[in-house]
Amino acid sequence: MRRTVDLDALRQVLCAALGSREPVCALSRLGLGVGAFTEDDVLHRPTLVAGAAGHGPTSPAPAAHDVDALIRRAAESAAAQILVPRVRRTDDTGALRAAGFVPVAAGAECVVRLSGDVDALLRGRIGAERLDDLHRRSRAVSDDLSWERIPLSGLDERPWARDAFVDLHGGLLDAAALGALRQSHLADRAELLVRRRGETVVQAGLLVGSHSGRGLYCLALTTDRDDPADRHDLHAVSLYQVYVEARRDGLDWVHLGQGEAEHGRALGADLFVPLDHWLRTPGLATPEQAPAEQAPAVPEISRFASLPVTTVAVPGPARFRHRPRFDLVDLSSNTNPLLGPGGRYPELDTTDLARTYLTTVAGLPGHDGIGALTTDHLLFSSGSVDAVMLLLTALTSPGDRVCVTPPTFELYAHFAQVLRLPVVEVPLGGDDVNRLDVERILAADPRVTILCDPNNPVGTRLDPEQVHELIARTQGLVVIDEAYVEFSDKPSYAGLVAGHDNLIVLRTLSKAWGLAGARCGIALAQPGIIEGLRRVQVPFGFTDASQHAVRERLVDVRRVRDSIGHILAERDRMAALLAEHPTVDRVFPSQANFLLVRLHKHEQVMDRLRAAGILVADVGRLVPGTCRISIGERHANEALLDALTAAL
């Protein structure tokens, strides 16, 4: 509700509650959480309340002419100060600052974005255990309380609902406010939510549909704290029912109002837009904690970015990824709106998903230091191989050398060659193929050195002292592909990203996380590098379906860890059996979910495996006489062993 006509209606609602022509009252009466201003004179001065007034979800930042009009109205109504509540930090607040308004942090607006099955969606946001508990509580409440949604137009026939709502809420949501709302154009989109036991109302809320017809604002929801039903977390239970009915009605989102992000996440919210209250009052200094910037600042581009990348912006709508779009009427995308939600482009603001990833991974063994990273250090890509192409495009120029360390993942050199970048090969050494020739790499003076650790196809880890030495001494970038690191008992390098502007760590959810079909890679680097990658990335490559799958898997980390444990146990079992098999010459040590095996009669055994319908990776061109065997389910592994025996 950010249209002028909606804001005018809400202003009249507040005026009705105050019994005045202008919405003027003391700050202390609004209950907006303005605790940063504790001076009594500020809290109790007559204040002109602007924007969406006291009842709206957010207020658009006023333009210069609107600010001038506010100042005139304040003078005419003898208001000593002006408040514009709940302004998004992504709005342009330059006119407010220029007019002497001061920002006060006000939490965030919390939005639950809906798509597909509500239970599947919530499972990916609050976890299966919390969802099961919510179902149990919902069943208990449904046996005890009725559920009604009463249009405002029907209140004359149900005066008890109006009276109960006013009794539970009190304050500015009184009978006069409801009466004014019924007289406004918002009445057709508004209804009361009521839960009662017999004739006793236990909970009452106010729901208003969005002007776009795509969402629902929950403007109020209050429960009788003395009622026994409150022990079932009735607030969350009723919101769950609102989500289900909103999705049934084809809505895309439910707005939960202002609150703390952690509380919103527990209710299933996945979009959090920081808010500030803006106050103009005589003699008020800017609080020390007032936000210095209203929109996320664009990071300074990395010194490694190529010249063309430094001169362009992030392409198209991705520039505005932090600006909420859920409550807009979108006529900008040239898509077909008549064939369902698949006609809309994916969500671009993945900030909360990035936070979830960092928080989850920080809890895994071997990830010390990752807690120092912020969402500005992370970019989602269409698989980690896509990130390789992005970084080579964004951070190299014609003639720059790319160093690879064979045997290694072949697409590194492939992408470099496609981009006409000279490729320098510095082979790994040692019996376990895990020794870097640091001096030779440094002598090649590459722009980018790409390491795979754990290495594919070998499975071993590089010497960490050599990796640290290379990062410290090279003049170029070091890229470490950690696609298999969750299977390793040695630590990740992700925690080093915050301290090195020449380090990029690539991760994926295709391997240990079991989401190869979701195509989700992660690049971790300093914000200036991430900014460079954004400037060459296709804006809508990370689909909504992939985002939902990733979120669901990240909150189910126990299942992931259990599966990794099973894979590691099966890997060790297979390594022991293969080492004793007559067709096998050597099984290389592995810190991944596969085994590199050297065969006695490589070509013959590979032919027999293919004939038996067993597909393993023939990597003999990389490491002579070898194949790479992924660890599968027990029956698949046994089929491999049987086929090897048949090949004797």
Image: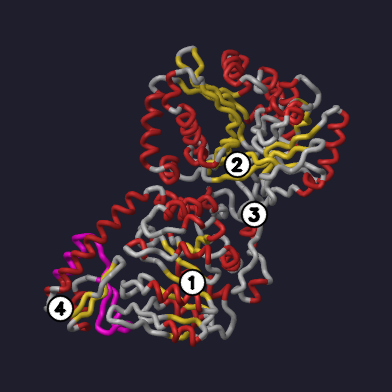
Which callout, 1 or 3, points to the residue nearer the camera? Answer: 3
Q: Give how far apart the Cα atoms at labels 3 and 2 are.
A: 15 Å
| Label whose residue precedes the other's in the sequence (3 or 4) | 3
Disc 2 target residue: 108
**Residue 538 is at least partly visible in this image:** no
The front one of 282 and 275 is 282
Q: Which residue bears the numbered disc 4? A: 583
Under mark 3, the amino acid is Pro
x then y, percent, for residue 63: 79, 45
Q: Residues within 10 Å of mark 2 (few under 14, many from 20)?
A: many
Question: Is the residue marked by circle 3 packed among few (<14), some (14-19), or many (20+) residues within 10 Å?
Answer: few
Q: Is residue 102 above or below residue 614?
A: above
N-term-proximal mark, 1 vs 3: 3
Label 4 near label 3: C-beta < 8 Å? no
Q: Which residues are magenta?
A: 615-642
Q: Amino acid at mark 2?
A: Ala
* Drawn side of residue 279 relative to residue 361, left or right: right
Helix, strand or loop at label 1? It is helix
Label 1 close to label 3 by CB (< 8 Å): no
Picture quadrant of residue 400? bottom right
- x, y percentage for residue 455? 35, 73
Q: Residue at x 61, y 34 (%)?
A: 209
Secondary structure category for the residue under label 2: strand
**Residue 487 at x, y = what percent?**
32, 62
In the rendering, which numbered label is found on residue 388?
Answer: 1
Above or below, 525 relative to 82: below
Q: How many marks?
A: 4
Above or below: residue 176 compared with residue 386: above
Q: Quadrant of the C terminus?
A: bottom left
Quickly name the residue at label 3: 296
Q: Residues within 10 Å of mark 1 (few under 14, many from 20)?
A: many
